[in-house]
Image (cartoon, helix red, strand yellow):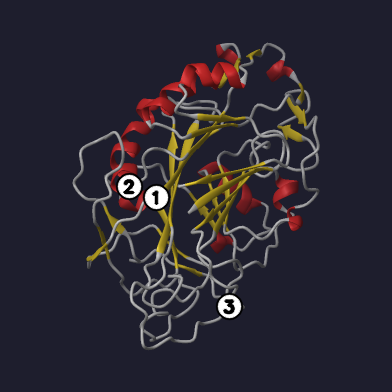
Amino acid sequence: MSLNIKHINGDTTFLLNFSPLQNLPPSPYFQQPPGQFSILVDPWLSGPSLMWHPKFLLSKHTVPPCIKSLSHIPEPNVVLISQDKPDHCHEATLRQLDPSSSLTTILAEPAAAKKIRGMKHFNPTHIHALSPYSDRKPESIVRFFIPPLTPGGLPGEVTIAFIPAKLDVSGLHNAIGITYRPPTTAYVTPNYFPSPLPPVHSISDASKPSVQPPNLPPTPPDSPLATSNFSITESTASTALSTPSSNCWSHAYVSPSLSISSAGSTSPARLPAQKTISVIYSPHGVSYPLIRNYASSHLVSSAALPLTAFLHSFDRVQNPWWLGGNINAGLPGGVEIAKSLMAKCWVGAHDEDKDNSGFSVIRAATRKYTRTEVREMVGKETQVEELGVGEELVLRV
């Protein structure tokens, strides 16, 4: 399986494409290649980023994005908004998304979700506010379930967890954890091959397939490839947009694209564990202790360590305390996370030399770090990349 990371602008807009790398022919029933899953992160294309008033903060790109419109890329499964600030939650760019799309779900930090709903551009049922992660609340992890590649195969899963910093008055600092476990083909060819249904987007808060973490020790050198639990239950939520077929294969996976749930399930059956791609996206940075619990519980139980990709700023930006204090944690704030999670690759994020003006940036001090400095600090085991606009990086697991 693989992760393709494409840098859309010079700042922190990324397109993440997860793929099982199975050589399957295209299907007219799938809106994208089978098993693939795409996430568009913090889209900001043309136009300035204005916060409150131009005299407070006005930002402009100094390098044009690689696309002029979101219509120039395939519809993503998820648009992920990490905060409500306009360089992350850019209204003019978000309005380029098709409001009638049944494929795309918007997941956003709570204040950003409120802002997007206020635009009255999207179907409100397609906008979901992220809850703070807690290992005691399985529903705090949003789970997307990907249909098996063939009847008799195993479904895949994408999880997204929101980890906000505590007592962060500026609202800048958080981390978002993403995992991808690919769907599989059948281990034994079935005698009966049911006809797949046409795409239907189903959203449900009821019980759906989920992975029950085994009792593993925290933070091992590498995630164990132990077995995990898996179950399928029928949704009974009134918010579901469709009723599954009675067919044994398509019943729980009526949508060839995905279905979403934030609830656990109750009837486990054994399932061979698979290696999982993992991503931490934290453009402004957080301290490692904030992530530790997520790593030692969810990432370990999902066989998702070492971390596949770490998207985090290189440069450190600091304001006086009365203007918000730290803006970007940069290399000093990210190195502990990268080392502790044994990150295979660190990709620089949110380091564009933007054209900034306004009261909020007149006292900002920036310490820039080069790839060489990052590599020296994090160690040779971690690949360090600084993607230019439009550049792509493929990581294979």
Residue receiving disc 1: 276
The correct choice, above or below, for 8 with respect to 377 in the image is below
Q: Amino acid at mark 2?
A: Ala
Earlier-in-chain disc, 3 versus 1: 3
Left or right of 68, for residue 283: left
The residue drawn where x is 51% and y is 44% is: 110
Numbered circle sitting on residue 51? none
Left or right of 77, for residue 181: left
Left or right of 23, for residue 159: left
Viewer-closest of 43 and 320: 43
Numbered circle sitting on residue 29? 3
Do residues under tags 1 and 2 come within 8 Å of each other at their CB atoms?
yes
Q: Quadrant of residue 370?
A: top right
Q: CA distance from mark 2 to mark 3?
A: 31 Å
The residue drawn where x is 70% and y is 43% is: 8
Earlier-in-chain disc, 1 versus 2: 1
Viewer-closest of 383 and 310: 383
The residue drawn where x is 28% and y is 41% is: 297
Q: Quadrant of residue 223?
A: top left
Counting other residues with Cα less than 10 Å from the Cα at mark 2, is it few (<14), some (14-19), or many (20 or more)? many
Earlier-in-chain disc, 2 versus 3: 3
Counting other residues with Cα less than 10 Å from the Cα at mark 3, is it few (<14), some (14-19), or many (20 or more)? some
The residue drawn where x is 48% and y is 17% is: 377
Q: CA distance from mark 1 to mark 2?
A: 6 Å
Q: Amino acid at mark 1?
A: Thr
- Please identify, in this view, whether the residue under mark 3 or under mark 1 is nearer the observer: 1
Q: Secondary structure at mark 2?
A: loop
The correct choice, above or below, for 202 with respect to 162 in the image is below
Would residue 63 be visible to someone looking at this image?
A: yes
Residue receiving disc 2: 303
